[in-house]
Image (tube, rainbow, N blue to C red):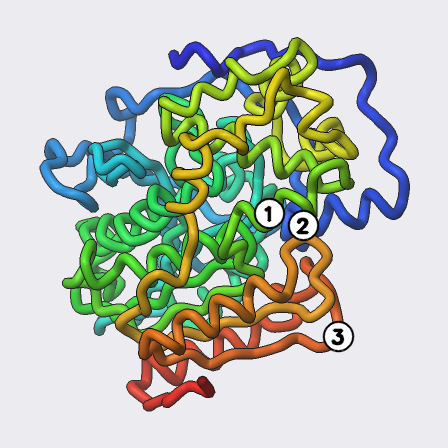
Amino acid sequence: MHPRKHPHPHHPGPRPRIPRALGRALVALAVTVAALPATAATAATAVGPAPAGSHQATTAEKPGDLLDVTESAFHPLPGQPTLTKAWKISYRSTSALGEPNTVTGTVIVPQDGRKGPRPLITYAVGTVGLADSCAPSANLPKGTAMEANLIQQYTWRGWAVVVTDYEGLGTAGDHTYVAGRSAGHAVLDAARAAQRIPAAAASGLSAESPVGIVGYSQGGQASSWAAELKKSYAPELNVKGTATGGVPAHLEKLVPVHNGSYGSGLLFMAAAGQDAAYPELKLDGYLNPKGKELISFLRNNCVILGSTVGSFKKISDLTTSDPLATPQWQKRLDESDLGTRAPDHPVYLYHALADELIPYSLGKGLRSDWCAKGGTVDWRTIVLGEHVSGVITEAFNVQNWLAARFADKRTNGNC
């Protein structure tokens, strides 16, 4: 068990009551259309021997290789039936430092009789929290996963979906929250792993399947990193397009937005995530006792409760000195920036004009960066709405855009 994950995290008194305005903001933080229970985490669960009824895979030698496949289930709501088969997978991926790691996820395949190459969506979820119990694979079988009804819409179109848990959710170590390179690897390797499940081949999922990359908010960062890394990291994947929205393209630019605001919990979650990805950052060395208590709490809870407890706090309230002012932190934050290379396939990029959590300027800037580097970008401004509504109101446009890419229809973008 990793020393930072605790089976019985400390709770600072009774669960706080959430004012109406803050509650709306926290729902936005979760990027969800179905509430996830705000519960404390269970102890960390390392990937070990396969449980009874699972199908043990061979030892992984390269990214995307399967370590384990276990039958699972997909329920958008508790007990809601779906005409699908699902498997929980453990697969080999690569950390932000380029080292081999293990990531878990869930593969969902419609049971509609289709035998030919079936499109595959590799889906990156928005913020769920830092604790193992928040992982999509822990909640999709129970009907409590945060974006399950959005995921279901892809299965209605006959597409398979693989949902990564990201590094450190449900596996040993801490979740490397918003460590973009790690997340991009996890998204791409999830697609590779899904295509290698023998039982899924009977339903048309294979290496020939066209692939779409999808994500919003934290998932927007992960899917955008996957899009940028695809050419060098996973060139064999038949990626037809990436649909990505609400993208935090520059983490450092979010600091003044969230420091001391209702979204400050996200800021401290991001600090914990960077620290998990890059051990030389040594976050604990900058924290005062209140800061250490909060970071411990965030590491062991899901987003609703964690964001509530972390809200309206400033960096200066929780630190003895500002880590973000140091060369080590500056270097890693700079490395998190998107827009340094153009994806080698078309991208549907969208952002709400009134996004209160991730400023519109970040999405618009990413569009400019990709366009300047020769990318094919279909840019969409959502005129009405804010952060959470963007992923909901744009869902059908995203699906239709991907359907056109799967049909090999050309797009020149609107750069």
The x, y position of residue 180, in whole percent, is: 40, 46
Quick one: quadrant of the C terminus? bottom left
Which amino acid does the dot numbered 1 rest on? Answer: Met
Dot 1 alpha-carbon crowd within 10 angstroms: few under 14, some 14 to 19, many 20 or more = many
Residue 80 picture location, percent across and down = 59, 51
Q: Which mark is residue 146?
A: 1
Is the Cβ of the residue at disc 3 closer than 8 Å to that at disc 2? no
Q: Nearer the viewer, mark 3 or mark 1?
A: 3
Provide the secondary structure element on which disc 2 rests.
loop
Q: What residue appears at the point 89 percent right and 39 percent down from the top-left corner?
A: 19
Image quadrant for the N terminus?
Answer: top left
The quadrant where residue 403 appears: bottom left
Q: Does residue 348 sit above or below 392 in this rendering?
A: below
Give residue 20's quadrant in the image.
top right
Dot 3, crowdedness within 10 Å: few (<14), some or many (≥20)? few
Q: Residue at x 20, y 33 (%)?
A: 100
Q: On the picture, is 71 further left or further right than 304?
A: left
Q: Are marks 3 and 1 in contact (CB under 8 Å)?
A: no
Along the line of sight, the residue nearer the viewer: 153 or 390: 390
Q: Is residue 360 left or right of residue 368?
A: right
Q: Amino acid at mark 3?
A: Leu
Query: Label 3 vs label 2: CA separation?
Result: 21 Å
Mark 3, secondary structure of its residue:
loop
- Please name the residue shown 32% across and 69% down the image: 342
Find residue 18 and name its label: none
At mark 1, the secondary structure is loop
Type of residue at label 2? Ala
Q: CA distance from mark 3 to mark 1?
A: 23 Å
Q: Are marks 1 and 2 in contact (CB under 8 Å)?
A: yes
Dot 2 corresponds to which residue? 34
Which residue is disc 3 drawn over? 384
